[in-house]
Image: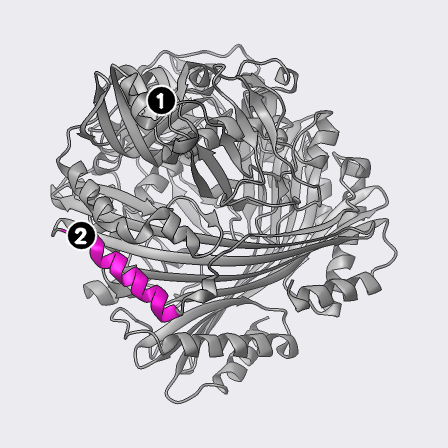
Amino acid sequence: MEALLEQTARRFADQVSAVDFWSLRLVSERKESLAVRQDVVQPPDTLVNRGAFITVFQDGGAGYAATSDLSPSGLYGALKRAREWAILTAPWNLLGTEDHPRSARTGGYETPVTEPWEGLSIAEKIDLLQTASRSLKIDNRIVDWWAWLVYRRIDTLLVSGDGARVEQRFHIIDPGLKAVANLGSKTQVRTGGAARGALQGGLERLEHLGFSAQGPRVAAEALALLEAPECPQGRMDLLLMPSQMALQIHESIGHPLELDRILGDERNYAGTSFVTPDMFGHYRYGSTLLNVTFDPSCDGEAARYAFDDEGTPAERVHLIRDGLLQRPLGGASSQARAGLIGTANARACDWDRPPIDRMANLNIEPGQGSLAELVSGIERGVLMDTNRSWSIDDSRNKFQFGCELGRLIEDGEVKGVVRNPNYRGISATFWRSLSAVGGRASFEVHGVTNCGKGEPNQMIHVGHASPPCVFRAVEVFGGGA
Amino acid sequence: MQDYFFTLADALQAKLQGAETLLLSFDGEDSDFIRFNHGQVRQAGGVARRSLAVDLIEAERHAAGRAQLAGGLAQDLPPLLDLLNDLRRQRTHLPADPYLNFDTDGPSGEIRVASELPTRSQALEAIMGASQRLDLVGIWAAGAIYKGFASSLGQRNWHACESFNFDWSCYHAGDKAVKANYAGLRWDPAQLQIRMQDARADLEIMQRPPKTIAPGRYRVYLAPRALQEVLAMMAWGGFGLKSHRTGQSPLILMQTEGQRLDPAVDLSEHHGRGLEPPFTPEGFTKPERVSLIANGAYRDTLVGARSAREYDARVNAAGEWPASLDMQPGSLGAGDVLDALDTGLYVNSLWYLNFSDRNQARITGMTRFACFWVEGGEIRAPVDVMRFDDSVFRMLGENLLGLTRERELLLDPGTYGGRSSNSVELPGALIEGLAFTL
């Protein structure tokens, strides 16, 4: 734990008085971003980000204030503003103060790391990226190419007037590759590494990903897409790789199950949900093969933690078991409002935003069989890999998603590459067409770094792990005018 | 705030070593946020944030950093000097940057945009009073936004703007709702009343039995807020120099094959609108306006500092995406829209757009708030949400029937990473045969 946070929390606790309840969440982040584009080293970017979020209950109201001024006077000023907000809004509060959590928990967490970020010098990291960048330029039709490596160390300390003390340190790494292939008016993009997600851990994640060796494959697939035929159109089987399952889980299970959406908080922005409170416990969300867990303990996943940002201890639970809907993604205050048991998922993207219901690690549990066995069960279909386009209605029902790369499957065998693979469906029925779930050996950890919701807006990282999955009779199509 | 930033810049400048050059960008806000749900206050609070971006340069080698500020030299200088030392250490491992580009003799200047905001309690009481018996959900965001630039070459720039943005919707039931917004620099409670009354009138229509339309092609009117979403997709790489030069623009067909939109389509980046600072993070001064599409044909692109050096062009924007987009009006009177639409969909709001085929500028998305079925020039019923999937080249090309004479200025209610000062001024669009798919 950073000494500054410790001192700041102690000073604040000593001076706070005359409020019914207070909590202080301190965040200190260091982020280092390295990138090489077209073999040219981009200027490194170092972020040093510190701030405080203060919550106050007073006279039946709740208010907050966030500040980047961690001096005693800065924190006192923020405390005063939070108290004023609580008093001002008390006559019109939607929630009673009894609906807000008052954590008194103590505990901590730190991401397990075997190869720390500091284990390589900046020169060695740049060399690694230069090598990766050069490996992407395999043809003149590769017109743009990138290799990047981002590291975040985030310290959080939550203390409260009721005695809570939760300190957590997260190490997050985000390595990525991108190759852009162009021929005339046709451009295709392929990405690699963990380009659309992030992982907890240290530099050991690079080896797990095979990061250094991925460049030629990524570039070759971008070139293959330039020459490939359009994805066929029609109802057929769809095999989604874990990289696309991450997005499918995110949009059509994660968001619909967020309890604050179900309670209407997000209706002006991120939207509502086709799921209603009465569905929990008996609604058939998917086929019997569908098992979905909220798993804050999964190794390497981006949202691994021991406590959420309100101090609620986190544990692995099933949200959907054998296809039946069990419980929502809702933190302590949403649970109190809805009268439902939820999860420890009240999260804030930074020190200047309040915790709200977020996805964390939301996974599909493994089934049976290898990828080859999934393919062998498909007479005609398309395999789709790596999300590139996502669109879904505000109830999280009618969706259309597109992927970077498709492969035709005929008579149980993978055939050639197809470009612009898209599919559309309706969440409420799509998961019931789930016909096969890959086994443990095919299970992969992915995630999303740009999950946006909330007013004021918050963008946060989440994890999604899944095996490849097969869906029957899905509406599949390609691009074109 | 301005004085503090310039004092801090002087103090850091005094700590430079050798032939170092220092560029500083200040970004701050004092923001009130009141979140509403079910006509009550869901969350309320304030954010005071000041951050400083630093670029430390010597002999074309440089590293960048950012740090949050407390607002006093005693607290801020030690960590900033630590950061400068970090950047110095990093710089020794870096090659010269061929695309480093900053203004060496830009003009100094300061702008404080005049404004008149209500107090917190005035705003809250006005909103609660006007929205009685409504299932209102949304956000009030208000306060000051500060941007500054300083370089060790002596340039000093400042831009401060206070604004408010109340963005809300009112629900009938399920997903049947109307959307409204009142944003600006000068608060007028009568304007809030008018907009709330308009929302109540639309809400009455939302109570009629909804119509579900079958997939197919329909004539549509896209109100300015809906058209804005289409333009935002065009702007996702469509107007930036780098995306054009690397084949990633969704408007690549306009670039390589001379594809044109309808001659009525005229788009420009209107930096002169003044809600954004007139200077870039590298100290360059933005031009008053950059023409992007004129007479339906592709014209210029937005050029950031690094791209300008890479592609030998002139800097004309802070980033390579529009922040002050301007679309010229047409000749269709707002009062004639329903007659001109005759039978089709009146679309107030589109939502969650993305590409089906980026090379073809083919986009998909959903209808959302207050979309109506119109027959014989009369609004008949709300429409259940539908997915469209069509090409911008058809929507704003061969199938564009007209643009309205009246335009709306829409201030972005977005607050990712801080309150946005982006805006767009645009008309509505009447379009033939938009493809709906699901």
- Which quadrant does the C terminus of chain B fall into? top left
Identified at 52% across, 17% down, the residue is A285
B277 w.r.t. B262: above or below: below
How dense is the environment of label 2, judged by Cα within 10 Å: few (below 14), some, or many (20 and up)? some
In the rendered image, residue B370, in percent from the top left (x then y), is placed at 49, 24
Q: Earlier in the sequence, mark 2 or mark 1?
A: 2
User: Dot 1: what SS?
Assistant: strand
Q: Which residues are magenta?
A: A122-138
Q: Nearer the viewer, residue B332 or B195?
A: B195
Is A123 inside the magenta-drawn segment?
A: yes
User: Dot 2: what SS?
Assistant: strand
Type of amino acid at the residue the image marks with label 1: Arg
Q: Chain of mark 2?
A: A
In the picture, measured across the screen, residue B94 lies left or right of residue B56, that is: left
Identified at 55% across, 24% down, the residue is A273
Dot 1 corresponds to which residue?
A424
